[in-house]
Image (spheres, rainbow, N blue to C red):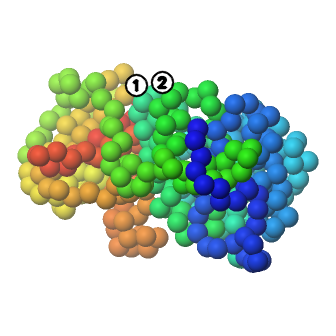
């Protein structure tokens, strides 16, 4: 991996200042073995503690164990279960890291996070977390966070390419440098391909391409999902997500609005379409539309991203569609 012009070594403080400048720092370390990772990440955490930063590790066991040992099991280094962050939905991960920063970062300092993103095993999971890595550059812009994303060089090339495109700085044993391959987050998310969903090529169990009776349609969807053999909580979440997105399309989109629903063993897919050009914001749904004041609404896509495994927004000459999908085993 190429690096650009040197910026500063990973653990260095800002010269001539007792406080770090505000804003998020988002670095990537692609490592060939855990020893290489520890040689960079452990001094970075310890330098941060010495400078007054807080420290947190959200990584897998193979990374967390050696890293904790390298920092002398310092009790100031908070360790969280990787799955509790990265196997939650992406808006939840964003909320969680904001909360960690608020709880642990001292005034004028940052929370340093060694994070090992779990990109999953399917192309749909890859896309969710590839988009997340771009979105956090904007979502955390004002947060007192410094993320060091550690990435195993043995991961598939599409993941490694996404790492190069979503992190403004790269870190190696030689230091920290500007990443020449970084892509503007909005451009990256807009151009990230949406995986094909095979169920969309099959007959749906429900097709209403011109919604006129929204209340009746909601009852029909509930009735169909009641017949699905799946976890009740998951089915209820999916129903709520479909209801939110369909409501948005009917109330805020351009008519006609439509809904198609597919069910298969262990899987649900719904596509909601309207004929407008809304939802053009590539960061829509990663936080409430009107910020933390939820009284103003604007929560539909944000809730859907938390209630479903995957949410894909697509635009074409006919309008905009939102595809919701959830699976279980």
Q: Which element carries disc 1, helix, strand or loop?
A: loop
Measured from the top left, where is residue 21 in percent x and y? 64, 74
Pick the front one: 151 or 139: 151
Q: Residues within 10 Å of mark 2 (few under 14, many from 20)?
A: few
Measured from the top left, where is residue 225 in percent x and y? 31, 35
Q: Is residue 31 left or right of residue 297?
A: right
Pick the front one: 209 or 316: 316
Measured from the top left, where is residue 131 in percent x and y? 44, 46
Q: How crowded is mark 1: few (under 14 residues within 10 Å), some or many (20 or more)?
A: few
Marks 1/2 in contact by CB < 8 Å: the verdict is yes
Residue at image location 36% in from the left, 65% down from the top: 289
Quarter location, residue 205: top left
Real-space CA distance between mark 1 and mark 2, rounded to the nearest whole angstrom: 6 Å
Quarter location, residue 17: bottom right
Residue at image location 8% in from the left, 51% down from the top: 256
Residue 147 can be seen, yes or no: no
Query: Which label number is shown at residue 329?
Result: 2
Residue that numbered label 1 is attached to: 266
Q: Is residue 282 left or right of residue 122?
A: left
Q: Is residue 188 left or right of residue 319?
A: right
């Amino acid at each position: 991996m190429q690096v650009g012009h040197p910026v500063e070594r990973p653990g260095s403080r800002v010269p001539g200042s007792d406080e770090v400048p505000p804003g998020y720092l988002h670095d990537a370390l692609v490592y060939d073995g855990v020893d290489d990772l520890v040689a960079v990440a452990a001094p970075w955490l310890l330098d941060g503690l010495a400078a007054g930063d807080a420290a947190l590790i959200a990584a897998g066991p193979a990374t967390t164990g050696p890293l904790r040992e390298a920092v002398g099991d310092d009790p100031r280094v908070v360790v969280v279960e990787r799955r509790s962050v990265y196997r939650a939905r992406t808006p939840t991960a964003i909320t969680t890291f904001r909360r960690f920063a608020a709880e642990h970062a001292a005034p004028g300092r940052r929370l340093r996070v060694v994070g090992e993103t779990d990109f999953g095993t399917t192309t749909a999971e890859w896309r969710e977390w590839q988009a997340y890595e771009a979105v956090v550059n904007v979502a955390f812009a004002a947060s007192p966070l410094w993320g060091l994303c550690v990435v195993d060089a043995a991961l598939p090339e599409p993941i490694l390419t996404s790492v190069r495109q979503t992190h403004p700085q790269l870190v190696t044993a030689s230091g920290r440098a500007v990443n020449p391959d970084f892509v503007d987050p909005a451009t990256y998310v807009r151009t990230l391909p949406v995986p094909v969903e095979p169920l969309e090529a099959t007959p749906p169990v429900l097709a209403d391409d011109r919604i006129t009776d929204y209340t009746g349609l909601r009852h029909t969807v509930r009735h169909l999902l009641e017949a699905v053999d799946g976890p009740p909580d998951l089915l209820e979440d999916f129903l709520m997500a479909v209801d939110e997105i369909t409501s948005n399309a009917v109330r805020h989109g351009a008519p006609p609005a439509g809904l198609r629903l597919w069910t298969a063993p262990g899987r649900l897919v719904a596509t909601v379409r309207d004929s407008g050009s809304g939802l053009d914001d590539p960061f829509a749904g990663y936080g409430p539309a009107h910020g933390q004041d939820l009284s103003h609404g604007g929560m539909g896509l944000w809730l859907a991203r938390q209630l479903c495994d995957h949410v894909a927004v697509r635009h074409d000459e006919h309008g905009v569609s939102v595809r919701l999908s959830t699976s279980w085993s």
